[in-house]
Amino acid sequence: MPEQRPGSARTVVVGILPDQPLWVLQAAGEYARAFDAELVCVAVDATRYAYQEMPDGTLLTAPIDPDLADSAPMFSEERLAEIGGLLDPRGVRWSMRELIGVAADALMHVADEVDALMIVVGARPGGLRGALRNVFTGSVALRLAHRQYRPVVVVPTAPAETDAALLDAS
């Protein structure tokens, strides 16, 4: 595990999706609490790209597919309230970042920036939807495990009770 710089706060980075079960955040929050660390929640929108950076650091973005022109935040106020309702009572200090680009790259960048103890991600969902997401974006956990030195914790998003159920979900 990398040594923390003097004076730096401990941090755990978690990759999250708007439709992901809150279980992933709960598990990441437990790690953050165990290490007395802040939890930085990172959501990455792979459907947008940056085309200009303003002098104040603001990025101007556009959708890769013009038919998907939606500039709304990834997380609704209600979903952010759910996240706060889960983490705040447990005493977990947390913040939210919404980024664009490739999820694994964005998570590595934030982890480097905050000198994170670890990166927590949810396992891809089973079924056709999860398989399609994996084909187009690749396995975030696998990319992280092969491309950086921090521990990567993979949290099951829908644990199955039997091997047969796991095989059916693929």
Image (cartoon, rainbow, N blue to C red):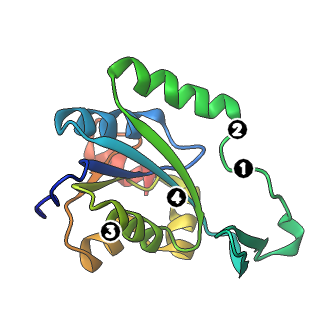
Q: Nearer the viewer, residue 105 or 67?
A: 105
Numbered circle sitting on residue 130: 4
Secondary structure of the residue carrying numbered label 1: loop
The answer to whether marks 1 and 2 mark residues whose Cβ atoms lie closer than 8 Å is yes
**Three-letter code, disc 1:** Pro
Q: Nearer the viewer, residue 73 or 127?
A: 73
Marks 1 and 4: which is nearer the front? 1
Compare marks 4 and 2 and give the one earlier in the sequence: 2
The answer to whether marks 1 and 4 mark residues whose Cβ atoms lie closer than 8 Å is no
Numbered circle sitting on residue 73: 1
The answer to whether marks 3 and 2 mark residues whose Cβ atoms lie closer than 8 Å is no
Secondary structure of the residue carrying numbered label 3: helix
Marks 3 and 4: which is nearer the front? 3
**Three-letter code, disc 2:** Ser
Percent position (x, y) of residue 97? 54, 53
Q: Sort mark 1 into few (<14), some (14-19) or many (20+) by Cα contacts within 10 Å.
A: few
Percent position (x, y) of residue 5? 17, 60
Percent position (x, y) of residue 100? 61, 68
Secondary structure of the residue carrying numbered label 4: helix
Numbered circle sitting on residue 22: none
Compare marks 3 and 2 and give the one earlier in the sequence: 2
Q: How far is disc 3 from disc 2 in space, using C-alphas?
A: 27 Å
Identity of the residue drawn at 69% across and 33% down: 77
Numbered circle sitting on residue 112: 3
> What residue is disc 2 on?
76
